Image (cartoon, rainbow, N blue to C red):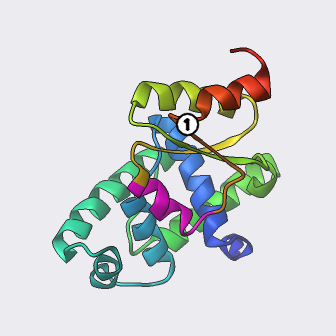
Amino acid sequence: MNIIYRYSFSEILEIIQQQVYLTKGCYLTIQEQEILKGTWNNLSYREIAESLYLSNGYVRIIASALWKTLSSVFGENITKANFYYTINNILQLDNTDNNNDHRNQYPKEHILIVDDSLEIIQLISRFLNKNGYRVSAFMNGNDALMFLKNQSINQSINQSNYIRYFHARYKWL
């Protein structure tokens, strides 16, 4: 049964991001997300590299590390060649075990955090995740802008507005 076709790439990416964050405490980089997107769209590494304006060799290095990370996170050998099959099996097992649809597990509000301090990103991300928000975080504006080309968000938090945001929203600052 091909359960993977019930999901859009964005939904699959969110499931993967959530699991990577829960397991590794970080999110996939823009390049890693683009490699997954290219894999989803059956692109070669050369085509993915061209879309990212990177060399084919560099994309292969990033991809190798990505597949190792995903294999570690999901406990199964995941490669470019078996990505669909393995993610489909993971979704089927999860669907059978939990009788849940991942799309209902994720918060409705998506918040983007941009800050050059990893500690600040982790602190704010943990707080927001515990309070039911979906968070995407970046340490520089260029990565955040690349992310925004393919994703929509409800709020953004950066150095100039996060204190005002939390004060207005939670009245604790």
Considering only vertical position in the picture, is 71 above or below 147? above
Considering only vertical position in the picture, is 125 above or below 46? above
Q: Main secondary structure of the magenta part?
A: helix
Relative image position of residue 21 (x, y in whole percent)? 52, 40
Of 91 and 27, the residue lying toward us: 27
Query: Residue, x 49% and y 32% (percent of image)?
Result: 121
Query: Residue, x 67% and y 55% (percent of image)?
Result: 153
Q: What crowding class fits label 1: few (fewer than 14 Cα within 10 Å), some (14-19), or many (20 or more)?
A: few
Q: Quadrant of the N terminus?
A: bottom right
Of 117 and 134, the residue lying toward us: 117
On screen, residue 83 versus residue 5, left or right, reads left
What's the magenta region? 142-151
> Picture quarter containing residue 39?
bottom left
On screen, residue 64 versus residue 10, left or right, reads left
Q: What amino acid type is highlighted by mark number 1?
A: Leu
Considering only vertical position in the picture, is 161 above or below 135? above
> How many numbered badges does the structure rendering display?
1
Task: Kindly state the secondary structure of the residue where label 1 is placed.
Answer: helix
Relative image position of residue 170 (x, y in whole percent)? 77, 23
Query: Residue, x 69% and y 32% (percent of image)?
Result: 165
Residue at the spot of label 1: 22
